[in-house]
Image: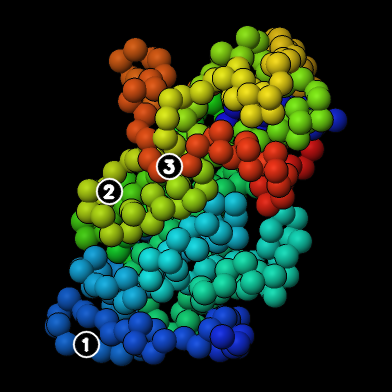
Amino acid sequence: MSLCSSFNVFASYSPKPKTIFKDSKFISQFQVKSSPLASTFHTNESSTSLKYKRARLKPFSSLDSGISEIATSPSFRNKSPKDINVLVVGSTGYIGRFVVKEMIKRGFNVIAVAREKSGIRGKNDKEETLKQLQGANVCFSDVTELDVLEKSIENLGFGVDVVVSCLASRNGGIKDSWKIDYEATKNSLVAGKKFGAKHFVLLSAICVQKPLLEFQRAKLKFEAELMDLAEQQDSSFTYSIVRPTAFFKSLGGQVEIVKDGKPYVMFGDGKLCACKPISEQDLAAFIADCVLEENKINQVLPIGGPGKALTPLEQGEILFKILGREPKFLKVPIEIMDFVIGVLDSIAKIFPSVGEAAEFGKIGRYYAAESMLILDPETGEYSEEKTPSYGKDTLEDFFAKVIREGMAGQELGEQFF
């Protein structure tokens, strides 16, 4: 992210449908193919296939518990995509929607977990969610309640090979971060592993390298437990941790403002930070690569988009170039943010509820000054050269599209200021 998202955070503080397994709220938009959903499972004792039986389930509630006997074969990577069941949590989120589409495109059997009321502030009902996730098997459940999630997956009647988590806190606040980035994400791991998952793909964030915010600490705590599970407790289980740089949407909030003739706002000289932004489509493709590519097993994978790293100043220059206008910038001293955050922190000592507001200010301050690039541990500097690139979509193309079509569908997450 860069100025746009940080400025917004800071300034804004002032085929026919068919229903099956009705009791478990499992809804599929299409006639489900019989072969993958009736897939066989193997125990460690024998290679003889057997049908899924609920009676064989053994409940467990922690990551160090034994794997359920219905576990799928660890050789799922040798299967055809049509025989691989991929559970996607966070499926209705900004990146999650694209991940679901990409997984379907590649032929996986996608089980998309969604809330009954999804989207920003729960604006989407079941019908709208089914439309958004067309082609996937949609399982309405609650990832914040482990027992509810486990029951929903059990009622599907078949196991899971891979879990892909695109969960992210809605506003980056303290409570929401620990509830979603840690607890709900851990629930999806525990539940997925219970029903056979042998691989977990986590959408994290590159900014956890320098954890100054609660959502970063929450993500890191889960990352550590995931790595410990695979590397110390269960060698048959694997993970891929994806840490992307800035998303296009976080850089697009000023496009329409500048289009209307207003200046491009940036902190300091516009060179305090830089990023290699990646499109949602390219990121979804990279996440999908992590399901089967063995060179991504048990790896932390920072990833950016194509091209050079861009500062907010350069992003603004690109925008003015597309519009055919002379650049016009408004430079805001970053010290203003420091002052306001200091005031909020002081008030929070007396009124703890203000702590959330202070955290939102810190989020804005962080993205205004910290680069979304690899942090070189030797130099303590951010490195453009060491930040991998992936995909083909460019920020310039994105800006041009937003100028033509607007930011519809690019809304930032919930912000309760």
The disc, 2 or 3, on the residue closer to the chain's N-terminal end is 2
Q: In the image, what residue occupies the spot 32% across and 84% down?
A: 39
| Left or right, residue 165 beside residue 38 | right
Residue 340, visible in the rendered structure:
yes
The correct choice, above or below, for 48 with respect to 126 in the image is: below
What x and y, as percent, mark residue 25?
60, 81
Q: CA distance from mark 3 to mark 1?
A: 43 Å
Q: Are marks 2 and 3 in contact (CB under 8 Å)?
A: no
The residue type indicated by label 2 comes to Lys
In the rendered structure, are the residues bearing label 3 and label 1 in contact, judged by CB atoms less than 8 Å apart?
A: no
Kindly state the secondary structure of the residue where label 3 is placed. loop
Q: Position of residue 321 (x, y in %)?
A: 63, 24
For label 2, the residue is 296
The mark closer to the camera, 3 or 1, is 3
Task: Identify the mark nearer the N-term, 3 or 1.
Answer: 1
C-alpha span from label 2 to label 1: 29 Å
* Residue 145 appears in the rendering: no
Q: Position of residue 135 (x, y in %)?
A: 52, 74
Amino acid at dot 1: Ser
Residues 308 and 288: in front is 308
The residue tagged 1 is 49
Which picture quadrant has residue 396? top right
User: Where is mark 3, residue-wise?
Assistant: 392
Placement of the C terminus among the 4 image quadrants? top right
Measured from the top left, where is residue 107 in percent x and y? 38, 71
Which residue is depicted at the point 71% across and 16% down? 326
